[in-house]
Amino acid sequence: MTAQDILLDTTRLVSRAWTKRRSTGIDRVCEAYARHFHTRARAVVQHRGMVKVFNRRDSDAVFDMLLQPSSGIRSKLVRFSPLALTRSPSRIPGDGMIYINPSHTDFDLPTHHQWVEKSNLRSVYFLHDLIPLTHPRLSSAHAVRRHLGRVRGLLRHGSGAIVNTSATQAQLAKFAEKRGLDLPPIAVAPLAGADFTNRPYSQTEKAQRFEAHKPYFLCIGTIERRKNYELLFRVWDELIDAFGDSCPRLVIVGQDSPQSAPVMEAYRSRPRLAKVVRFDTAANDSQIGALLAGSRALLMPTHAEGYGLPVVEALQLGTPVIANDIPSFQEIGQGIPLLLDVADETAWKRAICRFAFSDSERDRQLNMMEHFIAPTWQNHFAIIDSWLEGLASAERVPNERLQVEC
């Protein structure tokens, strides 16, 4: 048995293709895994405990549709799915084959782990973060319950886990120790951001409807409480008093979410912000790259992140970063970003004021970026492929973690 024998869960990618929603960070990871493994993997889809494993031919068709999306992908899925699902078994004689779930899809469900066991698979789960458990007040009760199930399921049943940072690994180890659970083998593999360096951006693109002579800052992330946009609203309310018409601008790029309402209410409660703060919920990669290239700095006041792709993307492009002082940013920033406590709003206001025009700290970051080592998917999968080979060749033993209750 080698790591050439792979089942890859494509549920999230199929769902995204069907709903036509824009990619999040986890979606980008799922797509990278599909691109890397599609020539040697069979595709898996699942829905609330019902699992289907496609044959080699149907898997090729699934990967082609997902990796070469077209405007007619929903029609293609409609034509393809009925027959393909009919001839796809729920259970296979896996003989220790490796199953990889690169998203957080359904591995909180007992039926999922029953399928893994009955199919004789070795399951590997990508745990992107533990945020609903470490910051439950920033998540819904439903999200907390489901993520608790995912982490417990991984620790009790998983043959291995992939994480994006040592910080996430440490949080998982702390969770396991507190509940008396053993850790499975873990691979720590940093994520590559979108490459915005392969094209020049015109000044018009950089300005993005703001006056070219007005400095602006950029914030990237889903519109939700965890991203802590309210801090920036309060800071910009004070900046208007300090700068008047010369106040720097703020662009927030992110998709709406079920938690968008309180964020937008906080924004609308300060009507004068509308002149200097704008939201872009539909920007594509090219537009985001242009905004990032022209901004004075990327702002990331988020309360918690498992990784933080925008930080990597900004540093790779040569844009300074001001971010919350959290372990993941300490790790991926390689000592370059200015990290500030989000409880110190005065420090955030002071830094933004300085960065808006000219500052030695901003110059320090620009100089240090010459030494920034950007994570790549090539390096990520070099780690993963080697780790999977070891996992596949290891002797299978009964999983004692299955007997542990928490």
Image: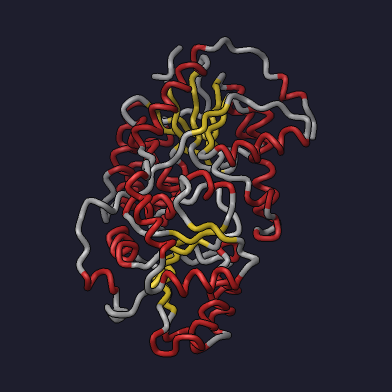
Q: Position of residue 283 (x, y in %)?
A: 34, 65
Position of residue 149 relative to residue 90, above or below, is: below
Q: Position of residue 81 (x, y in %)?
A: 38, 42
Residue, x 37% and y 70% (percent of image)? 358
Q: Which of the 4 image quarters holds residue 38? A: top left
Which residue is more in the foreground, 40 or 224?
224
Which residue is more in the foreground, 125 or 367?
367
Q: Locate residue 94 relative to residue 140 in the image: left or right.
A: left
Q: Can the viewer see residue 12 in this picture?
A: yes
Residue, x 55% and y 69% (percent of image)? 348
Of the 4 image quadrants, the one containing the C terminus is: top right
Residue, x 31% and y 32% (percent of image)? 60
Q: Position of residue 114 (x, y in %)?
A: 64, 28
Q: Which of the 4 image quarters holds residue 216? A: bottom left
How many discs mark residues in the rendered view?
0
Residue, x 60% and y 71% (percent of image)? 345
Position of residue 346 relative to residue 145, above or below, is: below
Q: Position of residue 403 (x, y in %)?
A: 77, 24
